[in-house]
Amino acid sequence: MSEDIKKFMYLNRRAPHGTIYAWESLEVVLIGAAFDQDVSLAFFDDGVYQLLKSQDTSGIETKNFSPTYSALGDYDVTKLYVEQESLEERGLTLDDLMDLKWEDEDDDWAEKDSIRLVSRAELTDIIEQQDIVFSF
Amino acid sequence: MKFSIQVNEGPYQHQATDSAYQFTKAALEKGHEIYRVFFYHDGVNNGTKLTTPPQDDRNIVNRWSELAKEHDLDMVVCVAAAQRRGIVDEGEMQRNGKDAENIADGFRISGLGQLIEAGVQSDRLVVFGD
């Protein structure tokens, strides 16, 4: 494997249920975390629903995989960009989303927020800086 | 240039798989290298030899197999996605106690690490999907 580090970004554009894209995207993220690349996730359009608090899928008998997002910090996946406009268009705020944290070992294991609220224009710039963009 | 291709949709249902094939073929004809073609989500259904389309339509699965044979392509079907959708090779058949396999010529079943590695190794990863 090449030793240079690439910037990998996963675009999450769809609701967590209804199709399998969100869950299978998360599976790629978890496997990909083992590759020591620079990883970030972006949530926009209906993808912001993936991070909603208190999800309950018992009524539709599908797997509730939302707790997995809380584990991302342990996989050194610490940059979750959420697009402000997508939240607003859906009547959501940051308070509706899970409180996702990671521990910064370079800062005495301080707990930090994984979710970074960005504007559509900012997200465009961030995507522009990536080497590899997976779209789910 | 060294490309890798990701196919996220099933054959016939969605044009992504046709576009991925046409792109791969065109890139090879132009002298580019295809490091890997990776099939994910319903894209794994590109790899079943049980597909029998009507005679007057393209045979998407055979078309991939022929391209792979001609260019020694590495075509990988994601194991986790394949298990969910019933795409099985000899090894998976035995491991999971099934009585049949259906993987088409030129395809192999492997892990998601192959997708990440393709991203690391290639100049461009091109994703075909919805």
Image (tube, rainbow, N blue to C red):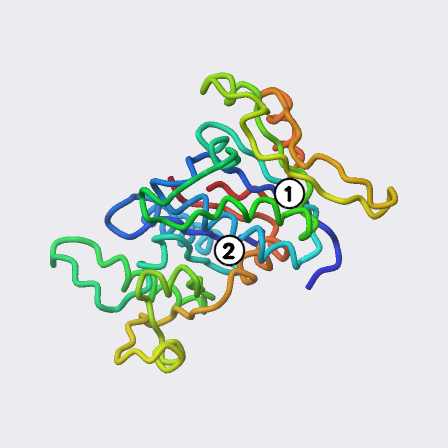
| Chain designation of label 2 | B
Q: How many labels does the image show?
A: 2
Residue A103: mark? none
From the image, tell me which residue sits under label 1. A131
Q: In this view, does B13 lie above or below A96?
A: below
| Label pair 2/1, CB-CB below 8 angstroms | no
Q: Which residue is drawn at 30% across and 78% down?
A: B98
- Residue situated in front as seen by the camera: A16 or B72: A16
Q: Residue at x 33, y 64 (%)?
A: B47
Q: Which of marks 2 and 1 is in front?
A: 1
- Residue situated in front as seen by the camera: A120 or A19: A19
**Left or right: A90 with respect to A83?**
left
Q: Residue A59, percent across and down? A: 32, 42
Q: Is residue A85 above or below residue A9?
A: above
Q: Residue at x 58, y 35 (%)?
A: A98
Q: Residue B23, percent across and down? A: 41, 48
- Residue situated in front as seen by the camera: A106 or A126: A106
Q: Work out whether disc 2 and disc 1 sit on a shared chain.
A: no
From the image, tell me which residue sits under label 2. B31
Q: Which amino acid does label 1 sit on?
A: Asp
Are there few (<14), some (14-19), or many (20+) residues within 10 Å of tag 1?
some
Q: Residue A13, percent across and down? A: 46, 34
**Left or right: B53 with respect to A57?**
left
Q: Which amino acid does label 2 sit on?
A: Gly
| Chain designation of label 1 | A
Q: Residue A95, percent across and down? A: 58, 24
Residue at the far left in the pictured view: B55
Q: Identify the element where label 2 is drawn.
A: loop
